[in-house]
Amino acid sequence: MKYFFIALLISCSCLLTGFQNNEKLKFKIKYGMISAGYASMTIDTLVFRDSVDCYKISAKAETNGFFDKIFKVRDNITSIWDKEKKVSRQFSKKLREGSYRQKRDQYFYPEQNFSLYLKWDMKKHKMKEKKLEIIDNTQDILSAFYWTRQQELKVGESKFINVSADGKNYKAEVKVHRKETLDTIFGTKECFLIEPVLVGDAIFKQTGNIYIWITDDDLKVPVLMESEVVFGSFKAVLEEADNVSFE
């Protein structure tokens, strides 16, 4: 479940295009034919970080009562994204996945080309700090997905993203495989099928392919996601969308 949720999250001009302010997407997660829980992705109104206008992007995942007995998940991830420069300013994640616990924060200073990575040591009950050099246009794992939604995509081409996460810097590739027509909550939509490819094990050891279907329009809304994990495969289907208008 950890691998799937992170994949969901990997999931620009000065004007906000590619999505709309206060957009909220809710997905139903299935493990095979079994309903496993829900995930949501939200971009909120403006906040301020380092005296600049930013958007607050949030992602959450939660297993339902039935799946809690098998593998309980309560994940919360937040990105503070610079409105003008479209780079990450702050990132935090708090994960609870079965017996696994994780709490990590990262503060980005793009003008000085460095970030501070903070990792909570569960055994010593204190934060460990690490300073990282970053290059221009560096994203976190959540803002990287929203950055992708603002790009012009073409079948057969890839987008490359500078990402800093879990104390490492790396380059992620988003492959644009083809277009497919899907039945969605918006009706029949032509969609891009994209695949994020992670380099090495900078975030996790990828055990299977990850596929995301996003609408072929200015909004590029994710309507379907599929991922293989060590104990099976998951699918996330968009079932609710607030403040999404194709007009």
Image (cartoon, grey):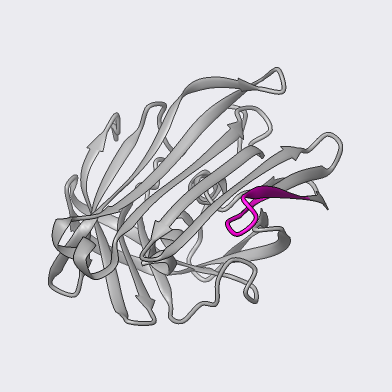
Q: Position of residue 197 (x, y in %)?
A: 55, 71
Residue 155 in view, yes or no: yes
Closer-to-camera residue (37/184): 37
Q: Where 138 sits versus 192, above or below?
A: above
Residue 17 in view, yes or no: no
Q: Where 146 sits versus 182, above or below?
A: above
User: What segment carries the magenta color?
Assistant: 118-129
Report which quarter residue 193 is drawn in: bottom left
- Total marks in image: 0
Considering the image in quadrants, where does the N terminus appear?
bottom left
Closer-to-camera residue (49/64): 64
Would you say residue 127 sits in the magenta stretch?
Answer: yes
Q: Main secondary structure of the magenta part?
A: strand
As drawn, is 40 to the left or to the right of 21? left
Q: Position of residue 157 (x, y in %)?
A: 56, 67
Q: Position of residue 92 (x, y in %)?
A: 56, 43
